[in-house]
Amino acid sequence: MSSESVIREPLITGGKTVHDVTEDISRRVEEKPTKLWMLAMTISLGLLAIGAYTVFLLLWEGIGMWGLNKTVGWAWDITNFVWWVGIGHAGTLISAILLLFRQRWRMSINRAAEAMTIFAVICALQFPILHTGRPWLAIYWMFPLPNTFGSLWVNFNSPLLWDVFAISTYFLVSLIFWYIGLIPDFATIRDRAKNKISKSIYGALSFGWDGAAKTWSRYETVALVLAGLATPLVLSVHTIVSMDFATSVIPGWHTTIFPPYFVAGAIFSGFAMVLTLMIVTRKVYKLEDYITIQHLEMMNIVIIITGSIVGVAYLTELFIAWYSGVEAEQYAFLNRATGPYWWAYAAMMTCNVVSPQLFWFKKIRTNIAATFVLSIVVNIGMWFERFVIIVTSLHRDFLPSSWAMFYPTFVDVGVYVFTFGLFFTCFFLFAKFFPVINMAEVKSIIKTTGEKAK
Amino acid sequence: MSNTKFILGVYEDEDILLSAITNIRTAGVKIHEVYSPFPVHGIDDVLGYKRSKLSIVAFLFGVLGTSLALTMQIGMMGVDWPMIIGGKDFIPYPSFVPVIFELTVLLAAYGMCFTFFIVSDLKPWAKPRIFDFRITDDKHVMAIDLDQNKIDVAKIDQILKDNGASEVNKKTFDEA
Amino acid sequence: MKETKKYWKGLEQLQKTPGFEKYANKEFAQELPLGDSDGETSRRDFLKVMGFGVAAASLAACETPIKKAIPYVKKPVNVDPTIANYFASTYSSGSDQTSVVVKTREGRPIKIEGNKLSSVTGGGTSAQIEASVLSLYDQERLKGPAAQGKGVSWEELDANIKSELATASGPIYLVTNSLSSPSTRKVIEGFKNKYASLSHVTYDQNSVSGQLDANLTVFGKRALPSYDYSKAKTIVSFGYDFLGTGVNTPLANKQFAESRRLSASKKEMSRLYSFESILSLTGANADYRTPIRASEQGAYITSLYNVIAKETGGQVIDGLPSIDNQILSKSANDLLHAKGSSIVVSGSNDANIQMFVNAINIMLGNIGATIDFERHQNIRSGDDKAFGQFVKQLSSAGGVIFYNCNPVYDHPLGSKIAASLKNISFSVATTDRMDETNSLVSYLAPDNHYLEAWNDFEPVHGKYSLSQPAISNLFNTRQVQDSLLSWADVGVNYYDFLRINWAENLASLGKKSILDFDAFWEKCLHDGVFELETVSTDEIDADLSGLGKAAFNITKPSSFLELIIFENGTVGNGIQSNNPWLQEMSDPITKACWDNYLTISPKQVEEWGIELGDMTTQMVNLTVNDQSLKLPVLPQPGQRYGTVGLAIGYGRSVAGKVGNQVGFNAYPMINVDEGGQLDFNIYANVTVEPTDEVYAIAQTQTHHTFMGRGNVIQEATLSEYQKDPQAGRHMPKIATSEGFKKPTAVSLWKGHQYANHHWGLMIDLNSCTGCGTCSIACQTENNISVIGKKEVLNRRDMAWIRIDRYYSSDSNGDSYADMEIAAENPEVTFQPMMCQHCNNASCETVCPVAATTHSSEGLNQMTYNRCIGTRYCANNCPYKVRRFNWFKFHDNEQFGDNLAMNNDLGKMVLNPDVTVRSRGVIEKCSFCVQRIQAGKLEAKKEGRRPVDGEITTACATSCPSEALVFGDMKDPKSRISKMLQIKSMEKGVEAQEPRAYHVLEELREMPNVWYLTKIRNKDEKKEAANAHS
């Protein structure tokens, strides 16, 4: 069945047997939390607490606690939202698209990547709720629920409403995709569990999985179909997010190039974030044999490609602005590059377009330290991209009388910190209590691509 | 108080397992089920399982999602309470596309997954029959139900051994 | 066998008394008062009383006005809940008096509007007038009389004061602002007769004493003439801001706008020249504006005089500093071509200069044509010299009565007055709130607010205006005239006094039309005004003999730093400093609020090394003689280099919690000579040292040029317009597969047809003078929050209608950086901007919860209680007119400045028809939908369609220059349809008027607000740029 050529680099090194896989991965779940993990957890809980305080201020006093004004109605809130959603693209993309393309190197990273996706989307979801003036109503008025206002429904013309559907669908589908993948591994842990509690917990989590061939064959179909559904979904999510801007009239927002450009950007930032986390995890959990340099290199290549696509998009925007002959458009883009927010534009250009090009050098793309640094640089750049798109477009649009500057307050920063706290808390909990690598899948390729096979 | 007796053939390697299955089935032994730690490619062919119909289920649920989305949006915007919004028509079809797509995917995915859970009897409170704790680790186990096979135990035992089973065990489940 | 039980209603029934039989089968023993059985209180009366009683209970003061008051519209005097009553009355503050109409709801005055019947105002208002209703509900008002700081009863107070008056040693002074009220003057006469030692001194905050003196010497009449700018073809103003802060600005705006209005039938308009140092509203509206030093004004006027004299054969005076300025000679030329139809005015308070101005007007034959001394104005009669004398002698006075005035604050000699007050035992003040003056006096006899008072006024000779209470006294205050009457033991109250006075002196004049006095009186009360067609007047003979002497007392041009002290268009002279609406109103020119500042020319900024940030500037030390202030500077394009400007009306110390310590007090800086003559221009000993202290000035607009965007501001010169009525229009075309098309021709949608009405607003950029009255009218009508300086600094001002003020730039448009810099002497364009009620509104499309939708009458509606506050609509509004409630602005001590929403008294001013918006929702202009609904209801009750003009928005009614016209574009006879030449299309409407345009037309939002191009009466474009020498 497997047409794996012998010359290709093994995906799993260190002569692992199927049993070793079980051991290496399950051990992390079974052993006592390490000091390092405790430290990491404390830090993320700290961030969460600090952030939570600013969230409280925001809810108690009002949106005025942010630096927004009559001209710039969105800034950090939606910037962070789009940023997190973008990050949330890698996981499902890796497991879905790479599954369809039978890219086996995905197998050792997709579990963690999907987890990251889900947590990133959870973080992203904070902003659509928190950025509204009356979140206590927004949280359910956003949905087409029967109501007593003379059955007043939602407005299906609004890209924000499309977002509601897109993001929640994406979240739910990613969640079930991830969970179905977890079931057999939970079963493994269940069967190894020593004490009653973990036996019953993992027993419940594993849904009574018994590894029967019949179930496996259904399981494979489900995985395949889910992948088929998730692939257009991944592409649709950021397409629809980009429509928040693309369908508006604001110069710098009103751009047909946005959907592909946003999707590329999302994959770009998503892979960068996966890299950042992977490099840490493999070190901490000594998973070098599962997440090899080859894995990192593969992802770096994806980063060069998407990074270049994004770069081309930036230039296209400038060209179109000039070509359109629309005054407001031309000014908007000139103002981005040379106006009061030039520094944000410069940061975006260097981090997203220039720095990833270093990955053309094999030395750099196979160097873990360099990869780690660049992966973070890329995510800084992607944050600035959204900031540039949102703030510099709004702050000087059509009527010069309304032109204004935006200055963030500590609450702007605090709410961002809050989502970081949330993200890492979730991620470390996952890393401790869930198998960070898809054991079943890895086992299925040990024979063919493990070193033994060669 | 009935109880079911099984003979279990434990295999280390999936390729040996696959050939074993073919031989044993030709020998006329009915295999109750084969349990593995990971999907073994081609095992359903040799066991004579038909291709799963879950993809069709997914499609049907998808169709349901599409029609649901369409009727919901037309009903809410065009029928129940038409309002002039941005000078657009009361039923602005282009605006409906995103929600139609999302609901299609959502229902297809969830419809299929829950069907899968039900047909495979996967549920948090399920009490599975565990033939061997190593199934979820690194062993493949072939279970043969004695009640289904009128051949005597020793014979089956022998067939399994001949077909590369690393060990052969017996297991009895008491079903109240 | 059971017998049926029998119950009786009582012994009466048992005994069958006739009394019982009578009512036996009636439910009620008495006749029910069905129908209006007159005499008896009927059921309806009961309901009325109830409705009114409920209101009365809820409010401190809700009864029908004490005496018989006649409402403005045909409504019963009784208060009908939810039905507005309108009373004609007269606004009075300091020296200003204006006929107004007061809108009351459940007995509470909630809105002031212009009185369309008054030819004195022309039916317009000003920001101060609109805002004055809030000061009625100000907690800072005095709650009752007081003696030596202790509350007393009126009886006690009267007793004390009478004895004091009787025993006073030395002269007693009655200090007032200008009083145009005949009856009040009569009261004061009587008071004088009673107390011989009493003398009456008058002053005005922005004194025109010099002009009055000049008029006295030249025309023998110490009064201001009435000007008619509408008749003028050429207007030349030397530093007189008749549009912004002059005398009776509503009328000036109306007349000026009339002279500027253009149409297919009228392609001529007036030309305005302005020679001034600061950029005033008048200068901003001028076709030719020349920045000059204040000290040069005399020279400019005299040389203009000589030119005119030479041409008209007047007496040329030699040896005068002559100015060679092409604009000046141009203006002279135009004046000579417009003899009898031109006006020359000067803002100088120097009699010598005003002599020459009079002379010029005489030579041009404007007197009697555009300048009317028969109908002289009475609202400025202050005498600087007399007042100077009074201040000198005050310390030795036996007593002083301050009649509704606050000279300690608003007169340059205030500090001297304060000092002398210490050693005067007997001093009375009648202002209705604590201020710098009455905090130093011994007796407080607080007057009613003008909305609680009876009074009459004669702002213009022969044109009377009545004041009637729209609400009975909120506090234990007493009308000042009543106080004077009781102190003079006249034994009649002012209302009767008033009626008697009118019966004796005015009824006879009005007889022609009205038969008996009561009818006459009621008519006058109803109309609020009584204007005589003709006035008896003595022949005016001009005497110019004094010119020669005057010529040599005129200030010569100097080269020192000069300080110009002016009044701004928001808080004005400072009487209403405690009014947050005015404090937060952005200045028409600088767009700053909550502050005054030193305006300096941009050149000076570099010279003094002032560092400017986004909304931040630096403090400087300004020193004039012995006075000095540390205050921020604000660079002002158009300000003459070498001059600095400072507004009065700020820096109050005892005004109330809103007005205290806002800005800096400029009054003490005003120059006072030996004789007491005031000069608002200081020519010498002005020094400015920059400090490195940073200061933030809150501005609602920080970008000052329109970046040459033809889709926003569309303007042309008169000559261009006469050639092509569409001159200056920017007509975008959209490229389609079938070639170029008008934006309106490209659409994906069928569009919607409005069956019944289609409301629209037309804004004539040519008539709009940018005064900003509309924004305060809107604030009053629509309960718009005041958010305070800090939030304005955060760029969160809530104005529903704002006036965008754009300066031209000298850039030729090749670099955006240059276009951002305003010209040194810019052309100014004002553009009122509010929700455009787009038929294809981009805000509606993006709201996820459909909280903003379109009505079937073309209105863009905002549903507050559905809004969740995503602010997406605000982002996607290309006009940036949507406002967000960043905080809870009502009932929140953090926003205590928001008087109208933070205490029970203040809340009385809220318009009950308009929701107070909660935190976290978007709000915006609604085209005053509550007024539309009310109007439609009124029409429906009478079974007719609404008549054009009966439904209009607050901004449009308040606009003194009638630049805003609101109406139904579906009604072909409506004013707006006619002016725009509306053509009904199968999708919406189209304006045929060549000047009509939509802002940002290419976006195809298809607004219901139309603008008419700005036309400047210039011979060639951009002359202003190179005009200044």
Image (cartoon, helix red, strand yellow):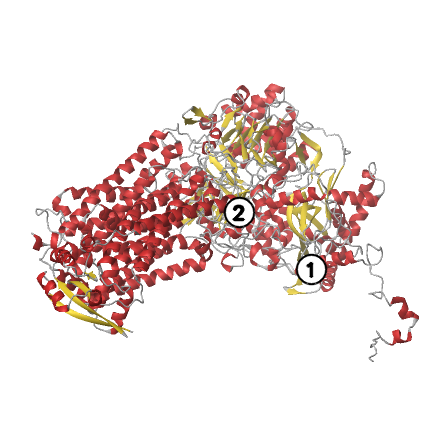
Residue C303 picture quarter = top right
Residue A148 x %, y %: 54, 55
Q: What is the quadrant of residue C221 in the picture?
A: top right
Give neighbour class at mark 2: few <14, some 14-19, many 20+ (Cα, 10 Å). few
Q: Which residue is mark 2?
A: B80
Q: Amino acid at mark 1?
A: Val
Rendered residue at 60%/21% (across/down)? C336
Helix, strand or loop at mark 1 = helix
Q: Is residue C218 visible?
A: yes
Q: Is residue A416 above or below residue A333?
A: below
List the residue tagged with mark 1: C54
Front-most of residues C772 and A72: A72
Return the residue nearer the eye: C793 or C989: C989
**Residue at far right of view:** C18
> Would you call the spot at circle 1 few (<14 residues within 10 Å), some (14-19), or many (20 or more)?
some
**Horizontal side, residue C830 vs residue C179: left or right:** left
Query: To which chain does the residue with label 1 belong?
Result: C
In-image side of B74 versus C34 (left or right): left
* A95 left or right of C399 in image: left
